[in-house]
Image (cartoon, rainbow, N blue to C red):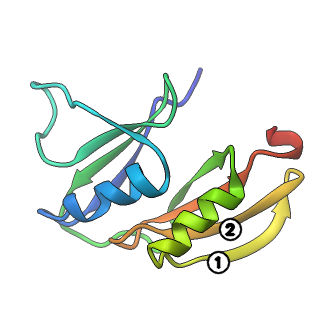
Amino acid sequence: MRLHHVNVVVPPGRTGGVVGFYGDVLGLRQVTKPAEGVAQTGAWFDIDERTQVHISERDGDRHPQAHFGLVVDDFEETMRRLADVGAPWEDQADIFGGRRGFTRDPEGNRVEILERAGELA
């Protein structure tokens, strides 16, 4: 068993405001969505060759603590890119032998960033 994707929700018409965050800031690669069987709004990104983040446009509130975690190869570079775009940062206690914290995309979705170190190396 493995995780295929996580889904992040943004308000209708607001995908464009988060594409740069997931692509340029977090370093994920945007991929083409299937032409049929899925909504044509939103966007999909590869985390690696087998795991994705899907952005879906939907009305309604999001739970403020809902999140997913990304293990990043270069924690310092990721922190720099987050700071460059003014993304919020909530430092957290180290876990698994590495640093971590929370940020939010431009629509307020929470993302945990974990350093590839210790047990996550």
64 versus 15 height, above or below:
below
Residue 65 visible in the picture: no
120 versus 59 height, above or below:
above
Distance between mark 2 and mark 1 Cα atoms: 5 Å
Mark 1 sits on what residue? Answer: 90
Q: What residue is rendered at 84% in x and 64% in y? A: 94
Q: What element carries label 2?
A: strand
Q: How many marks?
A: 2
Circles 2 and 1: CB atoms closer than 8 Å = yes
**Three-letter code for the amino acid on which mark 2 is drawn:** Gly
**Three-letter code for the amino acid on which mark 1 is drawn:** Glu
Which one is nearer the viewer's eye here, 97 or 72?
A: 72
Residue 9 picture location, percent across and down: 30, 58
77 versus 106 height, above or below:
above
Going from N to C along the chain, the mark reached first, 2 or 1, is: 1
Mark 2 sits on what residue? Answer: 101
15 versus 72 height, above or below:
below
Q: Give the image quarter of residue 31.
A: top left
Q: In this view, does 71 lie to the left or right of 108?
A: right
Within 10 Å of disc 2 (Cα), the crowding (few <14, some 14-19, many 20+) is some
Residue 7 picture location, percent across and down: 37, 47
Q: Is residue 64 left or right of residue 119?
A: left
Residue 45 visible in the picture: yes
Q: What residue is rendered at 47% in x and 79% in y? A: 86
Q: In this view, does 72 lie to the left or right of 43?
A: right
- Say the numbered circle drawn on residue 29: none
Residue 84 picture location, percent across and down: 49, 73
Q: What residue is rendered at 48% in x and 47% in y? A: 27
Q: What residue is rendered at 59% in x and 20% in y? A: 1
